[in-house]
Amino acid sequence: MLGLQQIRVLLAIRDHGSLTRAAEALHYGVPTVAHHLDALEAHLRARVVERRRAGAVLTPLGLEFAEEVERAIIHLDRAERIVADRRESGVSILRVGTFASVGSRLLPAAIAQMQQRHSVRVEAIEAEPTEVVRLLRSGEVHAGLIYDFSDEPAFISPDLRLDPLLSEPYRVMVSRSSPWAEQEVLDFAELERVPWVCSRSNDEAPDRVLRRTCRAVGYEVRELMRTDDLYMIHGLVAEGLGLALATTAAVDADFDVVLRPAVQDLGERRVSYVTRSEHPPAATAWLGSALKRVASRREHPAGRVA
């Protein structure tokens, strides 16, 4: 019966030019290599290796056979690696919750890095941070990218592990053609009558920052619309219908908007990678490491002094 060891011995002899060197490459003894070669030739009833004093070479028939069976070995090795990868990763598909603005900038590059070493597939599910955390706790995703207000973190909990990736200051998004764009710095004391585009959930970081800042200068937020659609937010602001809080990474250059700092301290948006504290699949750590490398390059690109 034809065996895998026999095929691997034949390929090693072809690649290394002698039974001795083939044995070293396979971590076999020379008698074991000779045994497998004899068994292969007995099975095929043909000479596939010509043994010489200076080494060994495959016969023309041996070369043709080796070329054909090598394809099968390559596929078999790949299949074995996939099984081992799935076994070690704990999942066959890693489901990751992510928000649009930074998720699209970090996640693809991190997936590319991870898949250079692992075969685990990644499925991205777009949602705002509060929904990502809910999906994580319910087991519908294995990990997530979320953002929070660095001064008032909302997702600190024993059942969650948060690994910070990067931080950006909050700014006010305004229409480029609006009078607000002509000011270098905006004062919230002058924005009482301006409507704002808010998140669907009051718990999202931009809304908490906005409410805190407006209340600090003596008024409540005037809402234009509640939406988590990033394109809708940009469109409403670009048309001059209202303002929104955003960060540099969240701005879409296709829209006619600009960011302006405020007199008041708006704090920072902190982006974190979140997993469950207990027994997360190993693949979550693989992706987390890749995300940290990608985020580090974004914060400290080559040629820029940090």
Image (cartoon, rainbow, N blue to C red):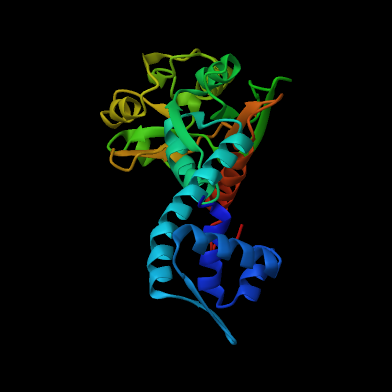
Which image quadrant for residue 18?
bottom right
Which image quadrant for residue 285?
top right
Image location (x, y in percent) of residue 212:
58, 19
Which image quadrant for residue 167?
top right
Up the image or down, 145 lies above or below 115; here it is above
Q: Evaluate whether residue 191 shows in this view.
A: yes
Image location (x, y in percent) of residue 192:
44, 18
The residue drawn where x is 66% and y is 36% is: 163
Number of marks present in the image shown: 0
Q: Is residue 238 left or right of residue 91?
A: left
Image location (x, y in percent) of residue 269:
56, 33
Q: Evaluate whether residue 185 shows in this view.
A: no
The residue drawn where x is 48% and y is 54% is: 73
Residue 277 versus residue 208: which sits nearer the camera?
Answer: 277
> In the rendered image, which quarter contains the C terminus?
bottom right
Image location (x, y in percent) of residue 3:
54, 52
Residue 66 versus residue 221: which sits nearer the camera?
Answer: 66
Residue 189 versus residue 97: which sits nearer the camera?
Answer: 97
The residue drawn where x is 46% and y is 54% is: 74
Residue furthest bottom in the image = 54
Residue furthest right in the image = 158
Residue 280 versus residue 236: which sits nearer the camera?
Answer: 280
